[in-house]
Image (cartoon, rainbow, N blue to C red):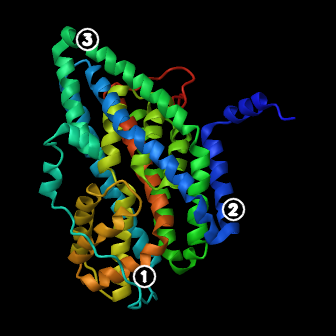
Amino acid sequence: MLDMKKLAATWFGIPLWQRILAALALGALTGWLMGPAAAQLQWIGDLFIRMIRMLIVPLVFVTLVSGVASMAAPAKLGAIGLKAMALYMGTTFVAILFGLAGALILQPGRGVTLDAGATSEALPAPMPLGERLMAIVPENVFAAFAAGDILAIIFFGVLLGAGLLMAGEAAKPLTRLFAAGSEAMLKVTHIVMEVAPIGVFALVASVMGSEGVSTFVTVFALVLVIYLGGAAHMIVVHGGMVRFFAGRSPLAFFSVARAPQLLAFSTSSSAATLPLTLTAAEEGMRIRPAVASSVIPLGATINMDGTALYVAAVAVFAAQIFGVPLTIGDYATIALTTVLVSIGTASVPSASLFLMAAVLDVIGITPDQTALVIGFLLPFDRILDMWRTVINVTGDLAVATSVAAMEGELDDEPGAVGAQPV
């Protein structure tokens, strides 16, 4: 007879990232064996995603307010925000260069022919930059909470935290309440994350069953551009930032990032991975809440390194398919437009596909040709999107670590994961 206590102790004794990795491999095998029938498991994965999304708004709001209220001086908040924005924009721009370089070297569009049968959904018009910036300030705070508008919640949370900080002693009871709420939400996150292996198994099985390994064959060169370019970007840029700004070992950093990366790969959503990324930042990299709770939610919203790399590569891919010659000026225009488009990308699966029209338009790709490209990519975009999300989440953690080091908000406790001497 099975000893359930011993079995549970063995299960929970295995690090979460190892359980997620095993579930990912088992899910891929199950999906391959079951084929389209694996779609029946999708509801289990969707239920897991709902549990994670349930956490996002309260976790971001409570930890952000608590983190801001715990700062020594209000002026520090502005320094943290400016440095985070600068690093996020910088890493996004470099990611674009990796995407352009990979597409120029591997020529993924050479020899690809698109037929008129590859059609796409109607493309929504991209939101103007002015509207995006205006939307940061909520007209109704409660409506922003109900809609899960993370940027608006961040804006209000920062203001409330700054207000608590400025109120000083009079606001101490409310400050302590938010601090307690932050601890409680992190514990709730731990509880939900124990379900992650089951959710990951179902999600990956469903994707593998519906898409299959054969989807890689059609666009193998483009897959190589995205996967190799993304891996190089994470190792060189993200690992280099952690070494240069924080003096931390890149290997230790990637060790901490494993669990969020695996969850990001499974869910294809930076927002869904946000609770685990916050936990890894505070408990693994030892980033104090003042930085982790403000920089990482901001990154989940505006930091789209993987999306930027992908959109830039697809722009060259499309130009190669339709024989559109590109000049140095065109590459610069692609880079600039991609930065703006990537900032507005929703952190949900395949969102970048429908924002590509703005980038393709600037290099002379017609709307009909854009529809053909998107229709061609749509069937296997999930496989590419999984890796793009890994790049995004890794960038969030790398920028948070770098900003924390610059602001003296990084703890170097003996034996802390990711804090080994280098």
Q: Real-space Cα distance between discs 3 and 1?
A: 60 Å
Badge count: 3
Residue 253 in the image, given as x and y percentages of width and height: 50, 39
Horizontal side, residue 264 vs residue 28: left or right: left
Q: Amino acid at mark 2?
A: Leu
Viewer-nearest of labels 3 and 1? 3
Q: Which is more N-terminal, label 2 or label 1?
A: 2
According to the image, label 2 marks what residue? Answer: 29
According to the image, label 3 marks what residue? Answer: 172
Q: Which is more N-terminal, label 3 or label 2?
A: 2
Q: Are marks 2 and 3 in contact (CB under 8 Å)?
A: no
Question: Which sits in the foreground, 280 or 157?
Answer: 157
* Residue found 15% across the figure and 42% down from its top: 137
* Residue found 42% across the figure and 82% down from its top: 109
SS assignment at label 2 = helix
> Which mark, residue 109?
1
SS assignment at label 1 = loop
Q: Real-space Cα distance between discs 2 and 3?
A: 53 Å
Instruction: Classify residue 84 by image quadrant.
Output: top left
Local crowd at mark 2 within 10 Å, few (<14), some, or many (≥20)? some
Query: From the image, which quarter does the N terminus lie in?
Result: top right
* Residue found 50% across the figure and 20% down from its top: 413
Horizontal side, residue 232 vs residue 344: left or right: right
Q: Amino acid at mark 3?
A: Lys
Q: Real-space Cα distance between discs 1 and 2?
A: 30 Å
